[in-house]
Amino acid sequence: MAKYPPMNDLLRNQRRRSRRRRSRRHGRGPGKLIFVLMMLAIGAGLWWWFAERDPEGDKRLEQEVLLARASAVVGESVLAARAPLEVEEADPELGTSKREEQLNAVWVEGEEVEMRGVLKSGESISGVLNARNISTQSIHSVVSATAKEFNFRRSRPGDEWFVRVGADGKINLLRYQSSPEDIWETTRSGDDTYQCVKLEVAVQVREEVIGGVVKSSLWQAVADQGEDGSLIYNFADIFAYTIDFNANTQPGDRFALVFEKVYIEDQFLRYGRVLAGAYTSEGRVYQGFYHQGAEDEGDYYDEKGENMKRQFLKSPLASVRVTSSYGRRFHPVLKKGKMHNGVDYGAPIGTKIRAVADGKVVYAGYKGANGNLIVLSHANGYRTIYAHLSKINKQVRPGKRVSKKQIIGRVGNTGRSTGPHLHFGMKHNGRYIDPSKVDAERGEPLKGSERARFLDDIVEPLSKRLNKALEKTGYKLEAAPINDQPSISAR
């Protein structure tokens, strides 16, 4: 620095000027504040002096104070409205509902617990209990006991369950419900054994009567009466051996039925038995009445006591249409005249196919133009043929027995076929016959005193109810002597 005296002087002068500026700046700040406060004080004093001297001053002051208070209240309200909603915590004793607790409960060692749930797709009762920390041994004990009364292979998504687990980790109670009226309860006794029982559920069974006219289909005619179309399957089952509803239903046909509806606490649950039915077509009347003997499960008999059951069902499908009958026809694929040894039923792919009689599987597999094919042999030299299937049920294999009405496969479009349908054929002693004309032997009729009771206690009262329902459709069922065919007449 000594080498450059002018520079040193310049720097010293610069530092002095900076200190003076800082001093002036700091000094003026407090002075200005004091000056402002003094002016405010003087102004307030003058205002008070003139307000005291002004007779209206007090009044103006009071109004200004009220206005200030009102503004404050409005401001607080606005702030409160903008603030997030605050909710007080619920009383711990209320908390989550007991059901919610049970749905999420897990067993903890040394504690008793109740838990419940609903099976989801792919779940099993053993799996869901194990996931709740219950031991495999305890689960096995209670499930094994329950399985003696309920087959868990029939478990379905939506089945409900409830268990009560003791402090020792063992299940004291299992309640399993597969429907509103199918509930099984398994309880643990003091010696660690389990007992399962099916609970009695109080149901109400009500009898109802409907009648109607077929316009497009029997299914729709029943639906038009306000009932679920599924009721038609129970009704058609009465006449499964005498009427082929796929081929013989005509617009203008009349029907009537007396049936049961099952309720639980006034809520409709399902349909019960069809107690009686009547069907009129082309001037003929078919009637069927349910009768349960002392040692059987019950069956349907006509108005004379004759068993309506025969060896064969009239159709292997519940409700579709005939697209091609038995006999010579122009083949749609081969483009030439050819004998059609069967009946074709048009139906969507996947429609269930029933065995028309008890029998034994002769063939089940793919066979050329027939596509997927099933052949069954029956008593008295009969065979039935089911062709063009999309699926053959696993249990249907050569040598296996099948029962009447058992589902053996599904409608398809395999082999030499122009569209989804079932080709149904029948042979008797090796020769093709028309399946629609087979009237095989009936089952055992009612006899003696049992027949008399049937006619008096069942046929007479239920016929009156059927007749009343038919009268509403424009027809009347005329009484006829026993062994004569009843008739209908237009009113």
Image (cartoon, helix red, strand yellow):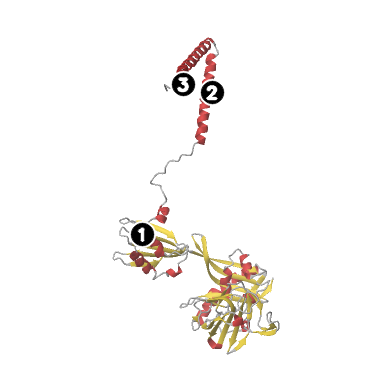
Q: Compared to 239, does 47 lie above or below? A: above
Q: Earlier in the sequence, mark 2 or mark 1?
A: 2
User: Which secondary structure, mark 3?
Assistant: helix
Crowdedness near tag 2: few (<14), some (14–19) or many (≥20) residues, C-alpha within 10 Å: few
User: Which secondary structure, mark 2?
Assistant: helix
User: Which secondary structure, mark 1?
Assistant: loop
Q: Amino acid at mark 1?
A: Asn
Give the mark toward the camera: 2 or 1. Answer: 1
Quarter where residue 116 is shown: bottom left
Q: Amino acid at mark 2?
A: Leu
Residue 400 makes an appearance in the image: yes
Crowdedness near tag 3: few (<14), some (14–19) or many (≥20) residues, C-alpha within 10 Å: few
Q: Earlier in the sequence, mark 2 or mark 3?
A: 3
Mark 3 sits on what residue? 7
x and y percent of residue 425 in the render? Answer: 60, 83
Q: Compared to 441, does 46 lie above or below? A: above
x and y percent of residue 251 in the render? Answer: 68, 71
Q: Nearer the viewer, residue 274 or 8?
A: 8
Mark 1 sits on what residue? 133
Quarter where residue 135 is shown: bottom left
User: Quick one: which residue is furthest to the left in this view?
Assistant: 191
Q: Compared to 354, does 161 lie above or below? A: above
